Image: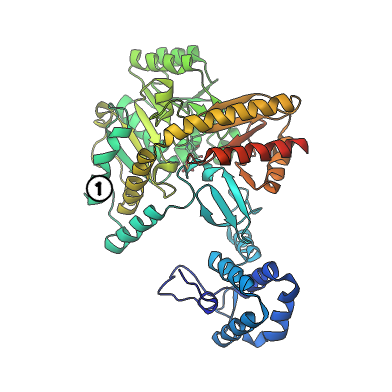
Amino acid sequence: MQTGLLNVLVNDRKLHPERMNPTVGRLREVLGAVAPGKAADIFDAHINKTAYQSNGNKFVYLTLAASKNLSVTLTKMLSAKEVKQVISLLQDADVSTKEAIDMHETYKIPVSRLEKDLVFVRADGVWLYDTLGNKYLDMDSNYSATNLGNENKEIALGLFNQASQLIATKEDRVHIPRARFLNEIHSMLPKELTQFYWQNSGGEAVDKSLKIAKAYTKQKGVIALKYGFHGRTHGAVAVTYNPAYRTPFLLDKEDWVYFIEPNDSAAVEKLFKEGKARIIIMELVQSEEAGVRPLDVGFVKKVRQLCDKYNAVMICDEVQTGFGRCAAKPSQWWASQTYGVVPDIMSIGKSFGGGYPVTAVVTKPKISAAMKPGYDGSTFGGNPMAMVAAYIATRQMREKDITANVVARSKQFKDGIENLKKQFPNLIGDIRILGLMIGFELSSKEAVVELQELLKEYNIHSSLSTDNSTDNAVRLLPPLIISAKEVDFTLKGIGQALKRL
Ligand SMILES: Cc1ncc(COP(=O)(O)O)c(C=O)c1O
């Protein structure tokens, strides 16, 4: 870590190959934040525009001589405390908030709505820091991908060591980090699910789950649930109900997908009986699109029975629900355990690598046996870096016993939100909680957006609902390491924000 002022004004590439010198935009932003009265003076009086340079791209930097001058000027004009703040903010980011947003707005293919309200640069456990050093309690976990918090020194060191040794090995080649990981992971899985196929995103894991299920059933029909969400690859979108995601890609008239209402086991049996489908895919807690909606236990158990009866494949998409998110008792790592069923195929991802991308299909040997060499393949699937992250992250989950924390914090949230409902009976509607997947309804979508905006004033960053979701639910997905004190902080903030709705 660089510490001196000159060290952050002139980046040492040996120490920080990932950074650049701060842009003029960032210097102005930081000085404006730390010493508002003096910022313009420092820049306009002491830095001549001839000191600006660019490498032909958009950003403008200071020359080496000007950076040295600025270092002397700042030391003279700012207090020691202010200098420390400048160093800290420049270490956090070398590009200004505006420049970062401009770059995204200029160059991003607009497949999604750009979230530019807060630009996070650093984290400490459940806390996220923005470009100006403001901190926010994370209630999103990057869509549930950072259950262990938003930074991880052990994973950082493991990745550094692995990248220094061997950075990439394709999926079909033997390597040591994967062997280490496989030796450990089975203690977290139902004993029937032993076979792995590695991927890099949840959508891919779902896609490959469908391929494997089709290879096994030798039938293309798939039952999917309305209001479910399974990702954005071609196959995952095809089984995701929301027409807004399927129609632009002409995936709204697929003859192999049958959408049914959640909890309608009669519809499942009918499709199995008629031979139209022998695969069913579902999220046990519909989250992204349904504002946290756990399926009925009776329905899930019935689907298990029907799959056994018709030799059909039950795919549980545990990309979001997995790795302890939905624990109702300690050591329930999967929502399917909480529901008391073992799926035939489980798609897992998100927090698998503690925030580093790694996902997988996990299945039973008899289903795995339907796949033959040449049926699939992946350059990056289960690469050494991913396996190192997964090995360390899953070990931490077990050692920290995060499911025990999920059970305790879930109850705290439930009691707290029920209490808020007593105080605000006209505002809060249905409350739906399983583990630390938390949803509570407000009267309208506008109210949800307004609450989310207000929560920022109480230093809480909540999970933004999908634009197209069918529900008016506020969704909270905190990192699973959240403490009792931090839950209290959240509940208090929500209470204060509700008063202003
Ligand atoms: C249940 C579920 N499945 C699949 C996905 C897709 O995962 P990814 O965005 O990593 O492709 C998501 C993402 O939100 C999800 O919630």
Label 1: few (<14), some (14–19) or many (≥20) C-alpha neighbours in 10 Å: some
Q: Quadrant of the N terminus?
A: bottom left
Farthest-out residue, right: 500
In which quadrant of the rendered view does residue 431 lie? Answer: top right
Vertical placement of residue 46 versus 177, above or below = below
In this view of the protein, which residue sits in the foreground, 9 or 317? 9
Q: In x, y percent, where is residue 100?
A: 60, 63
Residue drawn at the location 39% of the way across and 24% of the way down: 314
Q: Quadrant of the C terminus?
A: top right
Residue 194 in the figure: left or right of residue 463: left
Q: In x, y percent, where is residue 166?
A: 27, 60
Q: Tag 1: residue type?
A: Asp
* Residue for badge 1: 172
Q: In x, y percent, where is residue 154?
A: 37, 53
Q: Which color scheme does this rendered protein use?
A: rainbow
> Does residue 223 appear in the picture of this structure?
yes
In this view of the protein, which residue sits in the foreground, 63 or 484? 484
